[in-house]
Image: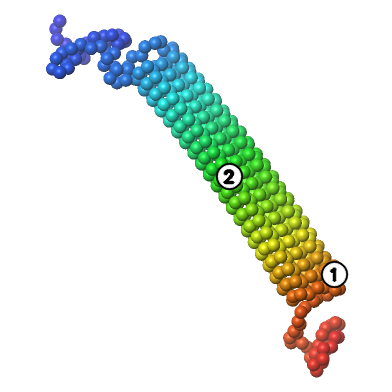
């Protein structure tokens, strides 16, 4: 046979792997098969029967037996779903229609349009579910997604886990950004990160921190440690061991505070309790606002127990009368309606309404009066001319009333 260039040869039929080919090895010309050469690149020819129009490219022990399925390469991969694809890696399976596994090891995409990008032993088991990567993650809700991390589960429809470790988003459109051992188990609930947090009320949010629980609808915890927002639309900004159990209640921060009534508010501090409707405590510690619209600004061991009562600050003060007021000091008691104690210590308005006390150690004995310990009047008029009835003027050192 006359010598010919390779380009002049006729094209062969489809190779079976049994064709013998010459090669030079150690200076000696030997023969091999096309299959042996293919094995150097991972195995061009696979044993077994593929699905109609399926493609098995390089690799070893791969199987593409779904209609128009494809295995791009790797080892022991299976594309058994119609139009499914495994690009490479090891022991991956794409068994759903149009399912895709990009690579990695031991990954499974087992439903319509399910996708696993890579990683290790990840599973996308629901229609249009996705696991991008990571280790032992599962996306089992329709249109659910796990971005990465380790042992995360997105089991709710449209749920998402961005990453982290052992997080679970188990209801409709629930979301966890990351962190560890977090749970978003109500529809539209969200945990941003942190550890051991739970958003279990509908549309509830936990931003981060540790051991926080937002259990009511639209409740929110920004962060901190072991806080609980159990009232509808309640909010805790941070701190630790705070409880917002009243609907629309708010705790800004601090430790061990409790806002237990509707629209009650605590700014911060330690172990304060706002248990009246629309009651407010600014801060301090061990303060109590227990009646409707009662207020304690700060201090410690103060109690505003009368409706619309106010204590600005101080220590061990009690405002128990309706619209009673204590400005500060200690051990003061404003127990009568519309009574006020400006400050000082050990004052008591008793049962006398509309009284005012300024000083210390004073107990009211009649209504509508102002009680003072000492009174100094400056710049008193020296003539009654032009003064209205009831005015005081200085008549040569003697006080007179017009």
Residue 360 at what x, y percent from top left? 74, 75
Q: CA distance from mark 1 to mark 2?
A: 50 Å
The front one of 365 and 296 is 365
Question: Residue at 58% of width from left, 49% of height from top?
Answer: 225
With 6 as the anchor, is 279 left or right in this view? Answer: right
Q: Report if residue 369 is visible in the image.
A: yes
Residue 23 at what x, y percent from top left? 19, 15
Residue 258 at what x, y percent from top left? 68, 52
Question: Residue at 33% of width from left, 14% of height from top?
Answer: 45
With 275 as the anchor, is 11 left or right in this view? Answer: left
- Mark 2: secondary structure: loop
Q: Residues within 10 Å of mark 1 (few under 14, many from 20)?
A: many
- Mark 1: secondary structure: loop
What quarter of the picture does the C terminus occupy?
bottom right
Q: Residues within 10 Å of mark 2 (few under 14, many from 20)?
A: many
Counting residues from the start of the chain, the first of labels 1 and 2 encountered is: 2
Q: Name the residue furthest bottom.
A: 396
Looking at the rendered structure, which numbered label has been put on residue 211? 2
With 159 as the anchor, is 52 left or right in this view? Answer: left
Residue 174 in which image quadrant? top right
Image height of 203 relative to 140, above or below: below
The front one of 350 and 136 is 350
Residue 291 at what x, y percent from top left? 77, 57
Q: Report if residue 338 is visible in the image.
A: no
Q: Which residue is mark 1?
A: 352
Question: Residue at 44% of width from left, 25% of height from top?
Answer: 106
What quarter of the picture does the N terminus occupy?
top left
Image height of 310 relative to 396, above or below: above
With 284 as the anchor, is 262 left or right in this view? Answer: right
Count of residue discs: 2
Image height of 33 relative to 175, above or below: above
The front one of 197 and 247 is 197
């Amino acid at each position: 046979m006359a010598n010919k260039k390779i380009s002049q040869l006729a094209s062969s039929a489809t190779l079976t792997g049994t064709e013998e080919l010459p090669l030079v090895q150690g200076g000696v010309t030997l023969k091999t098969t096309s299959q042996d050469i293919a094995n150097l690149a991972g195995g061009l020819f696979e044993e077994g029967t593929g699905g109609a129009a399926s493609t098995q490219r390089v690799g070893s022990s791969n199987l593409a037996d779904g209609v128009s399925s494809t295995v791009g390469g790797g080892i022991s991969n299976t594309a058994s779903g119609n139009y499914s694809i495994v690009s490479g890696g090891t022991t991956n399976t794409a068994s759903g229609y149009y399912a895709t596994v990009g690579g990695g090891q031991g990954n499974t995409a087992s439903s319509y349009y399910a996708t696993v990008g890579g990683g290790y032993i990840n599973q996308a088991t629901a229609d249009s579910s996705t696991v991008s990567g990571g280790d032992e993650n599962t996306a089992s809700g329709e249109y659910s997604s796990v971005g990465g991390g380790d042992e995360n589960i997105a089991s709710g429809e449209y749920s998402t886990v961005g990453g982290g470790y052992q997080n679970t988003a188990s209801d409709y459109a629930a979301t966890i950004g990351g962190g560890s051992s977090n749970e978003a188990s109500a529809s539209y609930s969200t945990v941003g990160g942190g550890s051991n947090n739970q958003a279990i009320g509908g549309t509830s949010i936990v931003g981060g921190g540790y051991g926080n629980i937002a259990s009511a609808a639209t409740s929110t915890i920004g962060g901190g440690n072991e806080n609980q927002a159990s009232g509808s639309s309640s909010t805790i900004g941070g701190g630790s061991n705070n409880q917002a159990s009243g609907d629309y209640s708010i705790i800004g921060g601090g430790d061990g505070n409790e806002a237990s009534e509707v629209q009650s508010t605590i700014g911060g501090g330690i172990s304060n309790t706002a248990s009246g409707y629309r009651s407010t405590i600014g801060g301090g510690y061990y303060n109590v606002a227990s009646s409707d619209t009662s207020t304690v600004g700060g201090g410690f061991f103060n109690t505003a127990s009368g409706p619309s009562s106010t204590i600005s600050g101080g220590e061990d003060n009690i405002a128990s009368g309706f619209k009673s007021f204590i400005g500060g000091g200690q051990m003061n008691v404003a127990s009568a309606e519309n009574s006020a104690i400006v400050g000082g210590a050990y004052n008591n308005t008793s049962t006398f309404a509309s009284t005012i006390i300024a000083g210390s150690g004073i107990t009211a004995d009649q209504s509508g009066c102002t009680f003072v310990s000492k009174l100094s009047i400056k710049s008193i008029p020296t003539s009654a001319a032009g003064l209205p009835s009831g005015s005081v003027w200085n008549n040569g050192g003697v006080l007179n009333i017009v």
